[in-house]
Image (cartoon, helix red, strand yellow):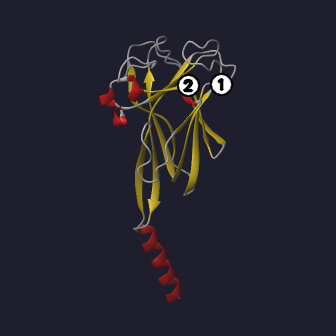
Amino acid sequence: MIARQFILLWYLSQVAYTIKTNITIDDSFPDPRTGNSIIYNPPDAWNSGTFCQRGPGKCTAVLDTNRLSGGTWHECTFNPVDSSSNDHPNTPSTATVQFNGTAIYVYCALALTTSSPSGNSDMSFFIDGKPVGNFVRPAPNALGYEYNFLVYSNEVLPPNVHELSIINGRAGGSKALIIIIDRIVYSYVYWP
């Protein structure tokens, strides 16, 4: 009986001393814990807001860098019929990152306009190759952007290494879309 109580007390003490920590992976900078960066494909379809700020570029979005994590963003447009916005018409783009954690949160800026840029959103989320969610929203036909917008969260992941993939657009889709990634935050648990 005493042995069972000791084991239970030891187990509870281990659980009580775990610490949950959030780590931010900026769209342009690596994970400070692991060094993993977000991988953007096709690479030439994505625009880095960092470079847009240094002079004329091909960025579609014009954002307030003071309202973004690290003052940066990555954007990609999906256009079902022409290549005016990038050289990959009717090709969904992806952003992928590996993380070791129990929860994940994806934050974007959302364009509110219906043109220049089209603020329509259609994102699909995959964890470890399995579909886990979607974010679909038509442009509200207003001016400006919404910042720090949580487009996906998952708080029930087993503690392990995972791969998150975000897909912008669908082959055969009929609407122009934009994705503006600000940051990805994940939680992990450790024992001090």
Q: Residue at x 69, y 19 (%)?
A: 172
Q: Residue at x 41, y 13 (%)?
A: 142
Q: Does residue 120 appear in this view?
A: yes
Residue wearing tag 2: 45
Q: Is residue 84 above or below residue 108?
A: above
Q: Mark 1 is on which residue type?
A: Arg
Q: Is residue 86 above or below residue 160?
A: above
Residues tagged 1 and 2 counted as in contact (Cβ below 8 A): no
Q: Position of residue 56 (x, y in %)?
A: 39, 17
Query: Which element carries disc 1, helix, strand or loop?
Result: loop
Q: Does residue 136 appear in this view?
A: no
Image-based side of 66 in relation to 82, left or right: left
Q: Is residue 61 above or below residue 38?
A: above
Q: Is residue 118 above or below residue 124?
A: above
Residue furthest to the left in view is: 66
Mark 1 or 2, nearer chain start:
2
Q: Nearer the viewer, residue 17 or 89?
A: 89
Residue wearing tag 1: 170
Residue furthest to the front in view is: 55
Residue furthest to the right in view is: 172
Q: Quadrant of residue 94?
A: top right
Q: Position of residue 49 (x, y in %)?
A: 41, 27
Q: Residue at x 55, y 51 (%)?
A: 156
**Label total for image:** 2
Q: Mark 2 is on which residue type?
A: Ala
Q: Position of residue 24 (x, y in %)?
A: 41, 45
Choose mark 1 or mark 2, whichever is in front. 2
Measure how far apart labels 1 and 2 are at the Cα level.
15 Å
**Mark 2 surroundings: few (<14), some (14-19) or many (≥20) residues within 10 A:** many
Image-based side of 36 in relation to 146, left or right: right
